[in-house]
Amino acid sequence: MATSTPETLSVRLAKPEEFDKIAASAREAFIHDPVFNYFGGHKELLPKDGDTVDTRNLETFFKFLLKSCHRVGGQIAVTVKSVETATPGVTEEKIVAGAFWCPPNKRLALWRVPTLVQSGIVEVLRRWGFSALMRVGFEYLDQSHAGMSAGYKAKGVKQSPDASWYLQLVWTEPAHQGQGIMPLMVHDAIAKAKPGIPFTLEATTSASRDRYLHLGFEEVYTINLGKGKVNALGIPASGAGAVGVSSWSMINWDPKPLESKS
């Protein structure tokens, strides 16, 4: 069942035939994200409008994330808006936001080679190069695992962080940001999950980190990437400006649906 908002937006599960549109929507939202700039080895900020090799490469990466999440049993949720078509009185749905959720103990891992290949890793490597695998598959994922494990240990929780619901990606297209869509999508997932299971994620900007703090997540670890190689925007730099980029490991230990919040 879809979850509706007063602005005639609704959250529902995505259909496989919508995957290309979803990847394009994610690319629009993350076009200047520092972490994804670093992942892609971008030499400069990508144009917000326009079809370039680098924007297509970024979109290809999101297709890979989407397909891999789907193949390991994840859930792809989208927020859609009804828009008028050229035919009077006829509307169609436009995807304006989305989220990739990995259920407990269903994560993509480097050892799952068939899943990686079927999801499009070869095309990602062809476009971004083998160095991207090192940045994403080792530098980032190793710190992500270490950060979540440290958070669990500090809390005295003995189970693996892999037993949580993991938010692989969430976004809202720029034109629809500021409308409360991201919190809606997070609470929609919490409401449908089995109670008592933690939710985990990494925030890739300080602004998104602060929004997650308001949703009940706590910061447990800071991931530092590309120090000495890129600036704070994820673009190649040297000297004092090569501070690298950061993301933040976050955990909501006792997620509650929106209506349960006091």
Image (cartoon, rainbow, N blue to C red):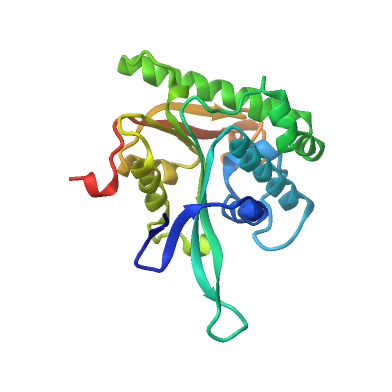
Residue at image coords 41%, 17%:
150
Q: Position of residue 145 (x, y in %)?
A: 51, 21
- Placement of the C terminus among the 4 image quadrants: top left
Q: Left or right? Give the position of 206 relative to 239.
A: left
Q: Is residue 236 visible?
A: no
- The correct choice, above or below, for 166 with respect to 43 in the image is above
Residue at image coords 36%, 63%:
5
Residue in front for this viewpoint, 235 or 202: 202
Residue in front for this viewpoint, 163 or 201: 163
Q: How many labels does the image show?
A: 0
Which residue reaches farthest right? 126
- The correct choice, above or below, for 213 with respect to 239 in the image is below
Q: Left or right? Give the position of 236 relative to 215.
A: right
Q: Where is residue 74 in the image (x, y as percent from the top left)?
A: 54, 37
Residue at image coords 65%, 26%:
137
Residue in front for this viewpoint, 54 or 194: 194
- The correct choice, above or below, for 123 with respect to 83 in the image is above
Which residue reaches farthest left? 262
Q: Can residue 82 be seen in this view?
A: yes
Q: Left or right? Give the position of 55 relative to 88.
A: right
Residue at image coords 43%, 45%:
208
Which residue reaches farthest bottom? 88
Q: Position of residue 128 (x, y in %)?
A: 76, 38
Corner quadrant of residue 139: top right
Which residue reaches farthest front? 1
- The correct choice, above or below, for 57 with respect to 240 in the image is below
- Placement of the N terminus among the 4 image quadrants: bottom left
Q: Position of residue 177 (x, y in %)?
A: 46, 59
